[in-house]
């Protein structure tokens, strides 16, 4: 299974196979519902992909707006809650993409990765005996991580 259509088809097959006798949904309805969720996942995936571009061009922002509009409308049509993340994607991300560099590494998954990396680094240097050298050791460590060896 490599995409949303495959995954949600598998869900539909499982739901149809395991449905109870008093289930009011026909197999076709189950297929349609699962396909709607698969489509929604694809729309959100496309919107997030465009939102994550570093230095997006004007056309990238236009495509983002198309995907996020379709995603939000599908999201609401399925009766899902408009969460803060949905609101931000719908109303604020396109403007942020217009700023120098776009959103790029500013998304929450990159910020979280940064927290994890800095947490590991702090833990690594927490037990240094020579307190005076801690800033120098920290700088040396950070510098070594930033230099890429080709």
Image: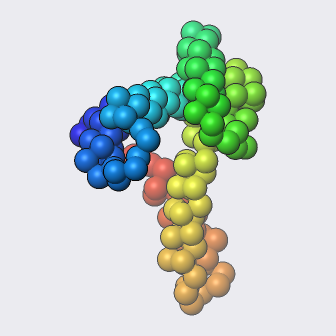
Residue at screen point 32% across, 40% down? 12
Residue 144 image point, x, y percent: 46, 57
Left or right: residue 12 compared with residue 101: left
Residue at screen point 48% across, 50% down? 146
Can residue 35 be seen by looking at this rendering?
Answer: no
Nearest to the observer: residue 116 or residue 93: 93
Left or right: residue 113 compared with residue 26: right
Location of the C terminus by quadrant is: top left
Residue 50 image point, x, y percent: 53, 25
Asked if residue 87 is positioned above or below residue 21 in the image, the reply reads: above
Location of the N terminus by quadrant is: top left
Total labels drawn: 0
Nearest to the observer: residue 35 or residue 144: 35
Asked if residue 139 is positioned above or below residue 50 in the image, the reply reads: below
Residue at screen point 58% across, 33% down? 78
Residue 124 image point, x, y percent: 50, 77
Residue at screen point 55% across, 87% down? 127
């Amino acid at each position: 299974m490599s995409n949303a259509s495959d995954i949600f088809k598998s869900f539909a097959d499982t739901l149809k196979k395991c449905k109870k006798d008093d289930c009011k949904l026909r197999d076709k309805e189950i297929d349609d519902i699962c396909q709607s969720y698969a489509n929604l996942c694809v729309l959100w995936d496309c919107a997030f992909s465009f939102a994550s571009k570093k230095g997006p061009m004007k056309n990238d922002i236009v495509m983002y707006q198309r995907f996020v509009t379709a995603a939000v409308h599908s999201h609401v049509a399925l009766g899902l809650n408009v969460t803060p993340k949905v609101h931000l994607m719908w109303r604020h991300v396109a403007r942020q993409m217009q700023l120098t560099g776009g959103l790029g590494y500013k998304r929450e998954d990159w910020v979280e990765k940064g927290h994890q990396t800095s947490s590991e680094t702090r833990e690594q240097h927490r037990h240094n005996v020579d307190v005076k050298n801690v800033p120098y050791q920290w700088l040396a460590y950070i510098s070594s991580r930033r230099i890429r060896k080709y």
